[in-house]
Amino acid sequence: MQELSRTSITIARPLPSAPEDKRIAHVKRQSWMTHKSRWSGSSFSSTTSSTPLFWSRPRGMSTTDPEKAAQICQQSVEKAIEDDIAATEPKERDYHRQSPYWLFTMIWAHQIWWIVTALCNIPVYLRLAVLPSGPERLNLVANASLINLTIVVLVRNELLLAGLYWSFNFIPFRRFYFHRMLHSIGGLHVGCAFATFLWIIFYVVELGKNTPFDAPLNIAMFTTALLLPLGISVIITFALRPLRERYHDIWEYTHRFVGWFVVADLVTHLALKAFTLSNPRDLFRTILPYLAIVCIISIFYVWFTVRRTKVTVNANHSVAIVKFKGLPTLNDGTFARISRNGLEWHAFSVATTDFEKREFSLIVGRAGDWTTKLIHDSVAREAPERLYIRGVNPPGFMHMHHSYKKVVTICTGAGIAPALPHIAQKTSDIFLVWIGKNHEKTYGKEVWDTVTSNLPSDQMLLHDTAVSGRPDIAALIEKVSKQHEAEAVFVVSNDPYTILCANICWRLGLRCYGATRDS
């Protein structure tokens, strides 16, 4: 490990605000044209460019304005990452396309869940095809619809997910593949949601064939059944990725409120269905009411854990550190959902936990209008005194640190937040690669001290984009993972950079964990 600190890390001048003994380690910019996939530590200086790639500051942006300085800081990191992607991604893409099985490797865990869902539903459909129209056929369709809907709801149950993430740490074999499927369980959510939509359409058709419209009760029952696929179609439409990314707030509201409407309509439909029977209690001889109860509890219990609590906010013009009283659901690897008005919710990783004071903190970086306004208000001494927070903190992929003894953790910017609990609690032997700008000044002394006081100097590499420009992430991953003998690599960054790092790890034969929209 000492060899790593001599060959692959150079020491930059300290930040003006940092003590003399706290210096930032950074890697000089490596020219992509001279990159070699296999290079020795002793040849590092000969394969790098001595001229860093600096970001050119736009005219009119003076660093004397703290707000603009914060924007410059973030843009510097984003620019360095974009340059690294532009230089590295073509080679990684070409490498994977050289594999004779590259089309097969494009089947992700998300799509595997779709296949599993289809394989489970197709036999039921085949059984349906041979049944004549009648009560038995109608009941089969109703059961299939509600079973799929229950799975849709349960895979988003945060307590259930916490239990699964915790238990999957103890799988003795092929652990990574189990983790992969669990982290992409959103594919099961999507697959069963689409199956629910199809089954409910079949149900409405069968109900129309078997229901006489000679009584108001039957008409009301059919009307409530007809509303079910309409509501689900609205949810599915705004959950499509292009619409979800462009109209995120609308997606959130339709998913929540239209979803609640669908559940209420389902309960109403089942109640009307019970009254059409000769004995309403006969409905409870089927699985339908019990599945509906499971859905109701799973959806609404979390809202009874919401509390509006006092918070402490410490902010500069780049990030805000928000402290809450209490402890997270799990000691590490979790995130919390918070809101200012109780309607618009945002998720942030739990950064630090003080078990003695029983409080934990979130790091809020600039990532949109909501976060920017929170930081701006906090700097202007108008920070909210109270925030809404949900009482259940679901886990994320970073919780899988527990499954490995030695890992490399790569963070960009405020992505350091989910790594801090693992650094502070030493859940595994971590080598940290943190890409940012003016780390201590930007993210504060508390974050800086958590990193530097818990990791030895030869197990962290802090790349300052203001000094060194773009990182050569391919070279860094290869070098650091070998030196540290890492069993897995964890990446906390934006989507393109996470995918790039995953492809690099795939080429190198390394396990890689990162955030995905499929989770």
Image (spheres, rainbow, N blue to C red):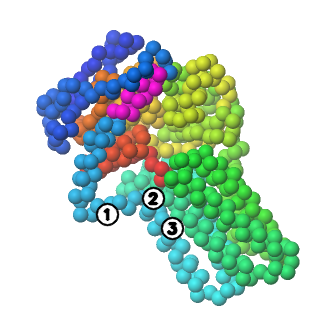
Vertical relation: 187 (above or below) 396? below
Which secondary structure lies at badge 1? helix
Q: Which mark is residue 103?
A: 1
Task: Identify the residue position indicated by label 3 in the image.
Answer: 117
Predominant SS of the magenta segment: helix
Vertical relation: 519 (above or below) 101? above
Residue projecting furthest to the front: 59
| Residue drawn at x 72%, y 44% as measured from the top left | 304
| Residue drawn at x 59%, y 55% as measured from the top left | 238
Q: Position of residue 492 (x, y in %)?
A: 41, 39
Near-viewer residue (479 or 159): 479
**Cα gap from disc 1 to disc 2, whole angstroms:** 15 Å
The part of the image, by quadrant, that contains residue 375 is top right
Q: Which mark is residue 239?
A: none
Look at label 1 and name its amino acid.
Answer: Leu
Residue 284 located left or right of residue 5: right
Q: Residues within 10 Å of mark 3 (few under 14, many from 20)?
A: many
**Cα gap from disc 3 to disc 1, whole angstroms:** 21 Å
